[in-house]
Amino acid sequence: MTQANLSETLFKPRFKHPETSTLVRRFNHGAQPPVQSALDGKTIPHWYRMINRLMWIWRGI
């Protein structure tokens, strides 16, 4: 029984997976409700993370 070279096994070309942002379509279901607190941050449509300016300033970004 022949064994494959370990380098060939580890570094063989792999299938390129699509970018995850292209897998899900997001729809705007009307206007977003206004943010009640400055500490809550602000939301942007079609973006998965809440943008919180105060937190970014605190982290030094």
Image (cartoon, rainbow, N blue to C red):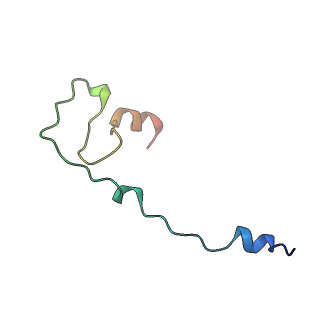
Query: 36 or 7: which is nearer to us?
Result: 7
Q: Residue at x 66, y 73 (%)?
A: 12
Horizontal placement of 11 versus 55: left or right? right
Which residue, as the protein is rendered here, is positioned at the far right?
1
Give the x, y percent position of residue 43: 26, 38
Q: Residue at x 20, y 48 (%)?
A: 27
Q: Residue at x 27, y 53 (%)?
A: 25
Q: Residue at x 30, y 32 (%)?
A: 41
Horizontal placement of 38 versus 11: left or right? left
Please identify the quarter of the rendering in which residue 9 is found: bottom right
Residue 52 versus residue 27 in the image, above or below: above
Give the x, y percent position of residue 21: 36, 56
Query: 53 or 20: which is nearer to us?
Result: 20
Give the x, y percent position of residue 3: 84, 72
Which residue, as the protein is rendered here, is positioned at the far top?
37
Which image quarter holds the C terminus?
Answer: top left
Horizontal placement of 33 versus 55: left or right? left
Q: How many marks?
A: 0
Which residue, as the protein is rendered here, is positioned at the far front?
1
Residue 49 versus residue 14 in the image, above or below: above
Residue 41 versus residue 21 in the image, above or below: above
Which image quarter holds the N terminus?
Answer: bottom right
Horizontal placement of 15 versus 53: left or right? right
